[in-house]
Image (cartoon, rainbow, N blue to C red):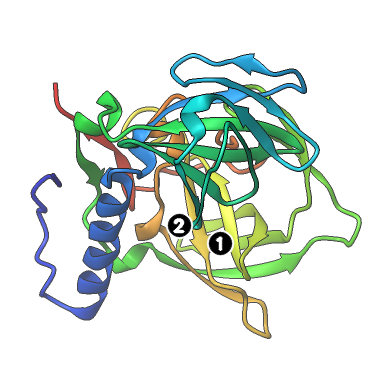
Amino acid sequence: MATPDTFDSGTDTFTADWASWHEARERGTASPFGLASLVATHWLTGAPEPLDGVFGTWHAGLDGIVGEGHELDGLTVLQGGRPVRVISGSTVTLTSGQDIEWGDRRLRYFERDGALALRILDPDAPTRTRLRGIDVFAPDPSWVVEGSFSPAAQDSRMEITAIDGHVSDDTPAGTVALAFPDGLETLTVVSERGALHAVFADETSGDETYRFRFLDMPAPDEDGRVRVDFNRAYVPPCVFSDFYVCPLPPAGNRLSRPIRAGEKNVVLEP
């Protein structure tokens, strides 16, 4: 389902490695329960209530998401994608990392700042069936930039606004100063799974590319050096479905130059 590539992935190791990353991104986002299959995020309260598009009633319990309905009996609970138990009866409690197999669909646990939501994933979602790939800039080694990491003060905090308007408090890992040929730029980064992560915008955002993008970086070396590869900048989940709650770039993370590297936007069937 990917759009034809305009680059030769066999020309060198750099391009071949990038092509493998790009192909994996397209496969992952377009898989039956990939990013494009999300059709609902239902925020829950402590009171059982019916939800559009799903059977029974659901609420936020002390131990997780509680579902009640005779349709639950016999359904399989997955943990990290692997079956862990079959529901016996009409009640279930979902915890972090768990899904329920519901025919061709899945019901998924989701949490943000202590608030719980039930998500519905459907392989037949129009956002998935119309998806034809991810448009990209051709890989270019000149967009691999040397960065210098400066850790944040121990008590530093930053405000993060999500695309749905929710505001949360986060701990920055620090900043990465980027050495472009014509000057320095700085990105505030957070720590994720032992690496660094940034949400950023640039002069292409909202025009040539989606309104903002994500970028992962390796952990800095002992001298604070970071290899920043903009060829692997990627569009956020909310480009695939309106039901994601992606964080927007924090203050200061709009680069004052066009970054013509990495993913641009999704390609949809007309």
The image quarter containing residue 148 is: bottom right
**Mark 2 belongs to which amino acid?**
Pro
Quickly name the residue at label 1: 178
Which labelled disc corresponds to residue 83?
A: 2
At mark 2, the secondary structure is strand
Residue drawn at x 60%, y 39% is 110
Which quadrant: the N terminus?
top left
Q: Amino acid at mark 1?
A: Leu
| Of the two numbered discs 2 and 1 in the rendering, the one whose residue sits closer to the viewer | 2
Q: Position of residue 230 (x, y in %)?
A: 41, 58
Residue closest to the eye, 78 or 207: 78
Q: Is residue 242 above or below residue 187?
A: above
Work out whether 45 lies above or below 246: above
Q: Position of residue 28 (x, y in %)?
A: 31, 52
Q: In the rendered view, tell whether residue 176 sits above or below residue 209.
A: below
Whether residue 249 can be seen here: no
**Which residue is at a point 55% across and 49% down the rendered structure image?**
98
In this view, the residue in front, 12 or 43, is 43
Q: Is residue 263 visible?
A: yes
Mark drawn on residue 163: none
Residue 202 in the image: state x and y as whole percent.
47, 40
Q: Is residue 204 left or right of residue 7?
A: right
Label 2 or label 1, whichever comes before in sequence order: 2
Quarter of the rendering occupied by the C terminus: top left
Q: Give coordinates of residue 101: x percent, y percent.
A: 41, 42
Q: Identify the residue at the far bottom of this view.
A: 222
Q: Horizontal placement of 250 versus 101: left or right?
A: right
Residue count near mark 1 (Cα–Cα under 10 Å), binned few <14, some 14–19, many ≥20: some
Decide: few, some or many residues near mark 2? Use Cα within 10 Å; few <14, some 14-19, many ≥20.
some
Tell me the distance, in whole angstroms, between the alpha carbons under discs 2 and 1: 45 Å
**Going 30% across and 36% down the picture, which residue do you hit?**
104
